C-alpha cells in the first residue's frame, strides 16, 4: 500500500488522501481558501485511477475541490452521507450511505463507518481491501452535542486522525467558560455576533449560551438547517433540537441586546459583512470560534482589532487522540488539520 497526502497534513484545510493499493481510492477533496495553489496535490493519473472518493462531511475544506477532482478525470463512485452528497456539484455516480452505524461492501472494498460528532452528515471510515486497512477519523469530536459513534476496539494498518488543536492544552469546559464570560460582558452593553458554519458548532454554541438573558437571532440558513434536524434525530438528539427550537424561535425584540448567529463563518458574503458592520456600528462585538481563513473578511476584522477569537472544540486535540489511540490498535498514525504536527 502507498499512502499519499494530497493535503491537510501540516496545514489547516485542503484535506485529501490517496490510497494506492490493489484498489485505489481517495478520501476527501478539500480546498485551501486563500492559498496560491488551493487544490489537492494529486496528479491527473492518480485521480483517474481512483475507483472511489469517500467524503467525511460537507465542509469545504473536505469537499470544496470535488468539482476540480471531476474536471481532472475522476469517474469513480462518490460515497458519503445524504447530507454530504447534497452539498456536492451535480455528479451522476454517487452512493448515499444508510443512516446506521454499520458496514457496506463495495465489491472487494469493505467500508465500515460511523458518526464523527462534527456536524450533521459527518462520518468516520475504516476502509479495507485485500492489501490495505486504513481508518480515517474525519473531523472527530466525542464531546459534541451531535451524536457520535465512538471509534473503539479497531485494528488498522494506518489511522488518519483529526488533531486540529494540536498540542494546545485544550480543555473544553475552560473554553466554554471563556466564551460565556465574553458573551455576558458584551451583552451588558450591546449585541454579540457569532459567525458560524451552517452545519456545525452553532448547535453547541446556542445551547451553551442558552441561559443568558437575551434574545437569540438566527439567520434563514440556520433556521432551515435546524428545522430539518427536528424531523430527523439521527444527527442531533431530540432533546437538543427541542432546546434549540425553544431558544431561537423567541419573538424578536430588536430594542434589546441579542446574540446573533449568522451562517457565514468567514463573513465573506455580502450579508455577513453587512451584519458585522451593523453589530459594530451599534456598539456590539464579534466573536469568532473556529479557524479563520487567510484572506477572509473575518481575518481582516481580527487584524484590525474589530473581532475577537476564542476557539470552541469541534475537533480533537493531541490529548483526545492519545485516548483514542489507547482504545484501538493502529500500526501507524498520521495527524491532519494541524500546522504544527
Image (cartoon, helix red, strand yellow):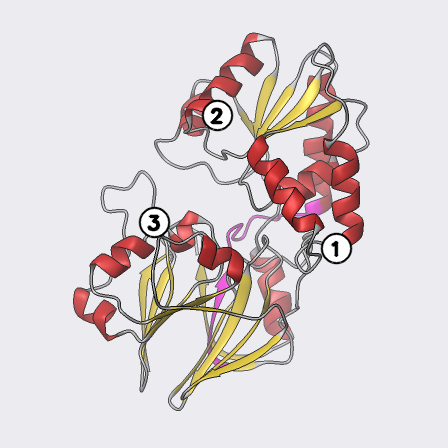
Magenta segment boundaries in residue numbering: 156-172
Distance of label 1 from label 3 (alpha carbons): 31 Å
Which numbered circle lies on residue 107?
none
User: Which residue is painted at 61% across and 9% down in the image?
Assistant: 283
Q: Which residue is mark 1?
A: 237
Rendered image quadrant of residue 3: bottom left
Q: Name the spot of residue 131 as percent of width and height, x first.
A: 37, 89
Which numbered circle lies on residue 31?
3
Looking at the image, residue 144 lies above or below residue 287: below
Q: Name the spot of residue 291 as percent of width and height, x first.
A: 48, 40
Q: Secondary structure at mark 1?
A: loop
Mark 3 crowd level (few <14, some 14–19, many ≥20, 10 Å Cα): many
Which numbered circle lies on residue 272?
2
Q: Quadrant of the N terminus?
A: bottom left
- From the image, state whether disc 1 or disc 3 is nearer to you: 1
Which residue is more in the foreground, 156 or 54? 54
User: Which residue is painted at 26% across and 54% down in the image?
Assistant: 68
Rendered image quadrant of residue 147: bottom right
- From the image, state whether disc 2 or disc 3 is nearer to you: 2
Distance of label 2 from label 3 (alpha carbons): 21 Å
Which residue is more in the foreground, 97 or 133? 97
Which residue is more in the foreground, 161 or 86? 86
Q: Name the spot of residue 271 as percent of width and height, x first.
A: 47, 24
Looking at the image, residue 48 lies above or below residue 263: below
User: Which residue is painted at 57% across and 15% down in the image?
Assistant: 279
Looking at the image, residue 227 lies above or below residue 39: above
Amino acid at each position: 500500500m502507498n499512502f499519499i497526502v494530497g493535503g491537510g497534513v501540516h496545514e489547516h484545510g485542503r484535506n485529501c488522501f490517496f490510497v494506492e493499493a490493489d484498489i485505489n481510492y481517495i478520501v476527501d477533496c478539500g480546498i485551501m481558501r486563500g492559498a496560491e495553489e488551493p487544490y489537492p496535490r494529486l496528479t491527473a493519473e492518480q485521480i483517474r485511477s481512483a475507483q472511489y472518493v469517500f467524503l467525511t462531511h460537507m465542509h469545504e475544506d473536505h469537499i470544496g475541490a470535488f468539482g476540480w477532482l471531476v474536471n481532472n478525470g475522476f469517474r469513480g463512485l462518490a460515497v458519503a452521507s445524504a447530507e454530504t452528497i447534497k452539498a456536492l456539484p451535480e455528479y451522476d455516480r454517487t452512493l448515499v450511505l444508510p443512516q446506521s452505524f454499520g458496514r457496506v461492501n463495495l465489491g472487494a472494498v469493505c467500508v465500515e463507518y460511523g458518526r464523527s460528532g462534527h456536524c450533521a452528515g459527518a462520518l468516520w471510515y475504516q476502509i479495507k481491501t485485500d492489501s490495505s486497512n486504513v481508518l480515517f477519523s474525519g473531523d472527530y469530536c466525542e464531546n459534541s452535542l451531535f451524536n457520535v459513534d465512538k471509534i473503539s476496539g479497531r485494528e488498522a494498518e494506518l489511522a488518519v486522525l483529526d488533531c486540529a488543536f494540536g498540542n494546545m492544552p485544550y480543555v473544553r469546559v475552560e473554553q466554554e467558560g471563556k466564551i460565556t464570560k465574553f458573551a455576558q460582558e458584551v451583552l451588558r452593553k450591546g449585541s454579540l455576533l457569532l459567525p458560524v458554519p451552517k452545519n456545525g458548532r452553532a448547535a453547541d454554541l446556542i445551547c451553551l449560551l442558552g441561559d443568558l438573558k437575551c434574545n437569540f437571532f438566527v439567520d434563514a440558513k440556520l433556521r432551515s438547517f435546524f428545522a430539518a434536524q427536528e424531523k430527523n434525530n439521527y444527527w442531533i438528539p431530540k432533546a437538543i433540537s427541542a432546546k434549540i427550537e425553544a431558544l431561537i424561535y423567541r419573538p424578536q425584540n430588536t430594542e434589546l441586546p441579542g446574540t446573533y448567529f449568522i451562517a457565514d463563518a468567514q463573513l465573506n458574503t455580502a450579508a455577513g459583512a453587512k451584519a458585522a458592520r451593523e453589530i459594530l456600528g451599534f456598539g456590539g462585538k464579534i466573536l469568532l470560534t473556529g479557524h479563520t481563513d487567510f484572506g477572509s473578511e473575518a481575518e481582516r476584522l481580527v487584524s484590525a482589532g474589530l473581532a475577537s477569537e476564542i476557539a470552541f472544540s469541534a475537533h480533537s486535540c493531541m490529548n483526545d487522540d492519545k485516548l483514542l489511540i489507547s482504545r484501538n490498535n493502529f500500526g501507524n498514525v498520521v495527524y491532519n488539520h494541524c500546522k504544527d504536527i
